[in-house]
Amino acid sequence: MKAKAISAALLLSFFVAPVQAQDIYKVQALTDQDLNGTARFVGMGGAMNALGADLSTMATNPAAIGLYRRNDFAVTGSFTSQPNGESFLDIDKSRASFDQAGLVFKTNVDGNSLKFVNFGFNYQKRRNFKNFVGLDNVPTFGLSQTYTMADMAYYRGVDLQTEQGYNSVPLFTGVGYDAGAILANRDASGNLDPNDPYTPLAADTYTLKRAQWGGLSQFDFSIGLNFDEQIYAGVAFGLYDLNFHSAVDYLEFQHGYSEGYLFQNEEKLTGTGFDVKAGVILRPIAESPFRIGLAIHTPTWYDLTYESYNFASVPDYSGSQVTFTEASDGIQPYDYKVRTPWKFSLAAATTIANKVAIDAEYEYSDLSTCSVSYPDYDDWYSYGSGNRDYSLKDEMKACLKGQSTFRIGAEANVAPGFFVRAGYNYVSAPMKDDAYLNLLVDGQSSNYASGTDFVNLGAINRFTVGLGYRHKAFFADLAYQYQQQEGTVYAFRVYDDAWGQNLAGKKFDLNRNNFMLTLGFKF
């Protein structure tokens, strides 16, 4: 069949008027973070908030750099693969990445109480968005993505043929109508039939391929203080750079036909953000290596720009040869803001005979407190005024939830200069079991939605191991991380109960392997 691959050139083509295009799933993606940083940090499962003295701790508990006694410089590279991934739109299933570069300068004050003032900078990749979802020949039992298009047009009270109505419809609905995916039904007077306004397509199976790529880079500038070798305090100012891409190929088939309805979508989200992190590490007993770490992170405030492109191709089986009607449209880049939740963490650690170090910690953030706002916009669709999207806020309260992270890690000095490490992470699911992409919200977030698929992510289990070598000023670390996660994939949701059923979710593994190498010097 005729199919068009979406490309960057299409994204930069002519777009329609400025719009908002945001949903709870994009907001949730900004709250996630990978276990990333130096190979030592990853090898210990990221559990170093109380142990300290690692460059990556600037992103978790900046007080940890107060434990440095020497200057430190390190860089890290990694290789990541998704076992069930596929090459799609020139995005390979495996990818190398430059993940970390940082340094700490120690300053010996040697005052009555204040002993060290240390300054640090660290870059690390907070998120690697690379992942792939692929589902083949999934039964739809007569349902179709075009049912969602019909639901949206009906709910919004829009006559797509005359472009009259009290509200706009999402971008994908307009593109689908232009391609003939939904047909308008008119009465004898030529008006849109109020009881049966649109007829969608029917399908027996669908195939979905979705690739995401890009990253979220984090730059931390921090200061750490050492008081009497018992109290360590620190603060870090973080800057973030977002570059996120998503592409979808969705194909439906009817029984007896080898050609089908095709929908393609590409999205691009870019922007910057900032936050502030503060923490302390306490040694309650001067003679004991036991220590406690506490940290608090402000929300991250993002300024973002979104753009999207949609394409639909609909077959006509009425003639002797199958022909296709095509339509495409896009969204002009539009700016909006996202605020993520506060984050709190508690850690405890100790060392044994200067040979073994152990750290365990707990972290919590309430994802339902996220918010989205737009410049020069009143949310008159729901309630209140101002630039915050209260309708989307209600969706986040209904679908997102508090997220807990537990980390534990250990390191052992097994021979002069040689170390072995192991760690474990558990991150609870960010969404409630019944969460879904609601395109019927009375707010700007759904007006120009560019797709119907969504994934409800499950909990994450991370298992890590690592090796380290120290020789005078030089050090090298290796780490391996296996991340296990399952998601429930939905190609679309039917909103009108009159259809009598809905599309079931499909379980899909999002597991991945990560190998890391860090090289550094202490001087």
Image: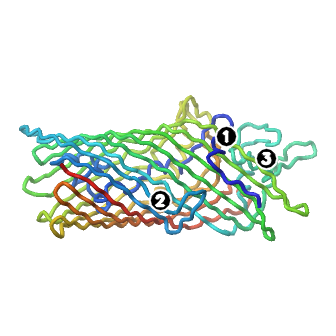
Residue identifier under label 3: 178
Q: Earlier in the sequence, mark 3 or mark 2?
A: 2
Image location of residue 246, percent across then percent down: 57, 52
Residue with the most extreme top position? 376
Q: Secondary structure at mark 2?
A: strand
Q: Is residue 180 above or below residue 386?
A: below
Q: Residue under circle 1?
A: 13
Residue displayed at 33% across by 42% down:
220
Left-right relation of 22 to 186: left
Category of crowding for the residue at label 3, using alpha-carbon neighbours closer than 10 angstroms: few (below 14), some (14–19), many (at least 20) = many
Q: Residue at x 67, y 34 (%)?
A: 17
Residue type, mark 3 in image: Asp
- In front: mark 1 or mark 3? 1
Between the residue at mark 3 and the residue at mark 2, the CA separation in whole angstroms equals 38 Å
| Secondary structure found at label 1 | loop
Residue 484 x/y as whole percent: 44, 66
Q: Amino acid at mark 2?
A: Arg
Residue 95, label in figure:
2
